[in-house]
Amino acid sequence: MNQHQTVDCDECGREVSKLWRRHKGHGYCSTCYARVFKRRMCPRCGELARLPKNDPDAVCRQCNVDKPCARCGKASSDYNIGKVTPYGPVCIACAPYFKEPEPCEACGKASQRLTRVARMGHDHRLCPRCSTADHGTCSACRRHRLLVVAPNGDALCKACNEQGEIACPSCGNPMPAGRGDACEPCYWTRTCRKRITIGQAGITTKALSEAFGEFGEWLIRITGPHKAALKINHFFSFFLELDQAWSRIPSYSELLHHFGAEGLRRVRLPMRWLHEEQGVEPDHQAKRIDSEKRRIQACLSSMPFASLSDQVLQAYWLQLETRIEAGKTSHTSARLALRAAAALLLATDREGQRLPQQGDVDNYLHAVPGQAASVTGFTNFLNRQHATTLAPRVDVKRARKRRKETLARTLMTMARCADQGEAWREAWIVAAMEYFHDTKLTQKMLRQQTVERTTDGIQVVVGGVTYWLPLDIEC
């Protein structure tokens, strides 16, 4: 037979089966309680109560807990007391945070929220995970609840199982009863509009606040309420930036200068709304130039800082920039030339302390023979500025062999492709013409030629000459 547990009275030290009162962490047995706590008037509320005689500032129990929650600050009139802690009373929601973690009697995991569940058929104290082990997602309303198996085998919550479908109170459309007061589209629409209202409160300019609301309604129509509700807070930062930078809807050139092409690509839907609803016309040419400038800066930053390679590449860029300003080349051509120069410098010396020599150029073009034209301008620059004698040389035979190998891999990959439609057929003919007949065609040129399907392949007529191609190859 189990013996009753005993505790020690903190006042007299006797072992007792139960403490009569605990005051400020100090336990009193019944004898000590009667001796120490005397009946007198509470200094705060004026009611009679048993208060410790050695503490003149003590108040009654009611006044002692008439305080805001010690954790969340909720007013005493707005919550039910969950626990009285040394720091003061706390509400029911905060009470678990002041409990010592104890092991779950099912899985052994420590938890501050152990509970007994009558439907489990035992009185074990369970953690939240074990206590809801019989919960799941209802196949009708998609809510995580206690499930029952319907006669048709579906796992449903109680409301969906008993009531089936009901009319949505907002729109009148049928919906699973477990959804409660709104169907899924109405729920997400309501959620999105709440987030729009919260966002509008953070925008100081009235016109932009209204514009954000109009954008939100447009987003609901274009993408649907679910996606709109998930995305609206992401786009709020864009409107907040407009509010802080201009306090109005700016022009496209101002947006491009402030955000850059990369930044505007991250807010495609707001930019689409500005174009369709506010008449902000995008400048695609300026956007392309901005993208090229960003890539050029990334290329310039690829060199070790303050190294010889960095200085040479910066000088080469100044020459290219002068040609751009004179209208002799484009940003795209300059970026391709600069990237080839950077690749050659890095292939020569990763530390950037040595300029390329002829062997370095040969090794670079041996690996990437297609860069010969792009790197020529840089080698000419080095010859003029640094008295080198570099000459881009490509081993034509080896380059042709590497090209053949690349085409062979392309054809093998295409042969395994499941979707062999018209686009696949055009790409196949272009690659096969170069691989089998050393004849280069573009897809645009191919559409102007005669192409006939035969029993064993394809016949292509180019310049009066008929070429035969296999329609497929064995992998």
Image (cartoon, rainbow, N blue to C red):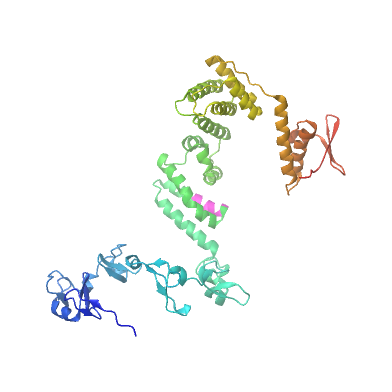
Main secondary structure of the magenta stretch: helix
Magenta residue check for 219: yes
In front here: 146 or 97?
97
Which quarter shows the C terminus? top right
Q: Position of residue 147 (x, y in %)?
A: 53, 73
In front here: 350 or 461?
350
In front here: 451 or 4?
4
Q: Position of residue 87 (x, y in %)?
A: 25, 64
Question: Taking 214 as reference, is 4 above or below it?
Answer: below
Query: Is 252 left or right of 71, judged from the image as shown?
Result: right
The residue at the far front in this view is: 1
In front here: 43 or 419?
419
Whether residue 447 is visible here, answered yes or no, is no
Magenta residue check for 379: no
Whether residue 220 is visible here, answered yes or no, is yes
- Quarter holding residue 276: top right
Q: Position of residue 123 (x, y in %)?
A: 42, 79
Residue in the image at 25% along x and 77% along y: 7
Q: In the rendered structure, which segment of residues is drawn in magenta? A: 214-222
Query: Is 362 left or right of 82, judged from the image as shown?
Result: right
